[in-house]
């Protein structure tokens, strides 16, 4: 389907189940779809913690045959997808249950599509490439294995997004794919699965969630459908992130952050992310920094730059960022928009400090020499992803280099 330039397209899974203990429902959902064999896609960490085993037992208790593919690595690669596809074919599974953070969920989304779409995988990088390829290749998309996404981080919101990020190992590039066909058929959002996240992971994935809310709200593609969800995501993060970080067993905070992550996913996938994500993917690809951390180190610097300037575009940006500040409760209704924007940047810096987020140059595995050698290519890759063009203020490559240097 071609979307007219003036229209906004809003896609979410047809079923979203939210609540403590909801993950027990993954098996019954697959059964209702008529599946008898499922592939459980997960990662080694969740196997070690016994979370994958528990899900496997629950699926078996629902009467399903279960094969397990547990080799998804953080920031999954094209090779992970191919290995998972082999497991899917070997098991002759009719449905996939993806259990994990954004990595397991994204890997499962692309496994499901590659069961019908031909290689090479990189032809699907970008926007709506699967949909464009479906008709000429005569692919019946209703025959694709149904995907049930069960997130264990709060998080990427990948369970409700039409987005997958897969690393092209040969090119050392994180490929962003956005297509309605990537949407899970069902999302099962159970905050109890996040209670085991250690503080550093809670912080990184939580700032990722906050970034989704902020970028969706300030994006040039924001719409009347995404705005309320984005603001709710921002408000929930402001209320719950620090508590979830300081008290990992705080049920109310965990539940709030899980809802925020889900809302952040719905908002950004339909309004787009902007400059922070555009710049963070090359950091992930080159230095293998976790996605949430690579966003967190950029968020204050990029926000400060995005609200600067004058003219009509800057006024629109400041209006939006001021609303973000007020939603977070860091600026009052009587503050001018400029004051509110300044308070927002201060609050984001303080949040990073409180969550022990380091500067980019202090992160493990980001040596100055390699950074200086790569920063030009990283800026080009950021621009090529398309995300910076949705930012309220659009940079050129030299300005992106300067922003990377500031964040360092
Ligand atoms: N598809 C999307 O819409 C979207 C959006 C944002 C990011 N992403 C992608 O998602 C990936 C990052 O996902 P992520 O940040 O959720 O992390 P992740 O999936 O990479 O997991 C990171 C680590 O956390 C562990 N972990 C997961 N759940 C845990 C739990 N409950 N307790 C303890 N440990 C746990 C995992 O075993 C893993 O070792 C990146 O590749 C990023 O590009 C996708
Ligand atoms: Fe993200």
Image: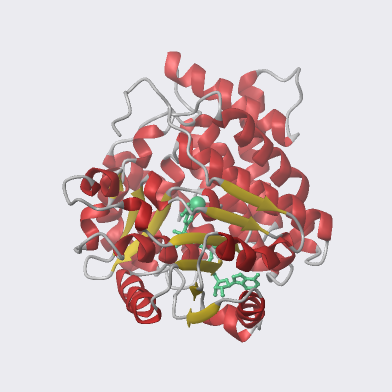
Does residue 259 sit above or below 271 in this rendering?
Answer: below
x then y, percent, for residue 87: 38, 79
Q: Residue 272's spot in the image, x, y percent?
A: 44, 38
Image quarter in which the C terminus is found: bottom left
Seen in the picture, residue 95 relative to 333 is either above or below; the reply is below
Residue 381 placement, left or right of 192:
left
User: Which one is nearer the viewer's eye here, 97 or 289?
Assistant: 97
Task: Give the farthest residue toward the left.
Answer: 136
Q: Nearer the viewer, residue 110 or 372?
A: 110
Q: Residue at x 30, y 63 (%)?
A: 114
Quarter location, residue 92 = bottom left
In this picture, residue 387 sits left or right of residue 219: left
Residue 205, horizontal then vertical, whole percent: 59, 58
Q: Report the residue at 21% width, 48% height from top.
A: 133
Rendered image coloring scheme: secondary structure
Q: Residue furthest top?
A: 312
Q: Residue at x 55, y 42 (%)?
A: 266
- Quadrant position of residue 159: bottom right
Residue 104 visible to the viewer: no
- Compared with residue 249, is residue 69 higher up or lower down, i.e. above or below? below
């Amino acid at each position: 389907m071609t979307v007219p330039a003036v229209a906004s397209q809003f896609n979410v899974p047809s079923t979203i189940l939210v609540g403590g203990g909801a993950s027990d429902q993954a098996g019954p959902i697959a059964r209702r779809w008529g599946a008898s064999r499922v592939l459980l896609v997960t990662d080694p960490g969740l196997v070690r913690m016994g979370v994958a085993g528990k899900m496997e037992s629950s699926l078996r208790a629902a009467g399903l045959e279960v094969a397990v593919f547990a080799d998804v690595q953080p920031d999954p690669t094209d090779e992970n997808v191919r290995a998972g596809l082999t497991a899917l074919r070997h098991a002759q599974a009719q449905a996939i249950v993806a259990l994990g953070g954004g990595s397991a969920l994204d890997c499962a989304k692309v496994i499901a599509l590659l069961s019908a779409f031909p290689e090479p995988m990189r032809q699907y990088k970008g926007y709506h490439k699967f949909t464009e390829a479906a008709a000429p290749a005569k692919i019946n998309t209703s025959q694709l294995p149904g995907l049930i996404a069960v997130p264990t981080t709060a998080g990427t919101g990948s369970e409700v997004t039409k987005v997958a990020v897969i690393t092209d190992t040969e090119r050392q590039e994180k490929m962003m794919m956005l297509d309605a066909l990537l949407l899970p058929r069902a999302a099962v959002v159970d905050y109890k699965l996040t209670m085991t996240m250690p503080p550093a992971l809670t912080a990184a994935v939580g700032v990722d969630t906050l970034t989704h809310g902020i970028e969706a709200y300030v994006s040039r593609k924001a719409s009347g459908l995404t705005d309320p969800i984005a603001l709710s995501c921002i408000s929930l993060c402001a209320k719950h992130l620090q508590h979830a970080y300081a008290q990992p067993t705080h049920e109310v905070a965990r539940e709030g952050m899980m809802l925020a992550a889900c809302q952040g996913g719905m908002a950004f996938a339909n309004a787009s992310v902007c400059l922070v994500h555009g710049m963070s993917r090359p950091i992930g690809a080159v230095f293998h920094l976790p996605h949430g951390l690579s966003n967190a180190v950029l968020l204050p610097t990029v926000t400060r730059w995005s609200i600067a300037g004058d003219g009509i575009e800057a006024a629109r940006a400041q209006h939006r960022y001021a609303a973000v500040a007020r939603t977070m409760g860091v600026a009052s209704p009587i503050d001018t928009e400029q004051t509110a924007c300044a308070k927002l940047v201060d609050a984001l810096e303080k949040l990073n400090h409180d969550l022990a987020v380091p500067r980019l140059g202090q992160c493990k595995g980001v040596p100055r020499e390699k950074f200086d050698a790569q920063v030009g290519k990283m800026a080009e890759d950021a621009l090529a992803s398309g995300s910076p063009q949705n930012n309220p203020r659009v940079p050129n490559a030299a300005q992106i280099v300067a922003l990377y240097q500031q964040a360092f």
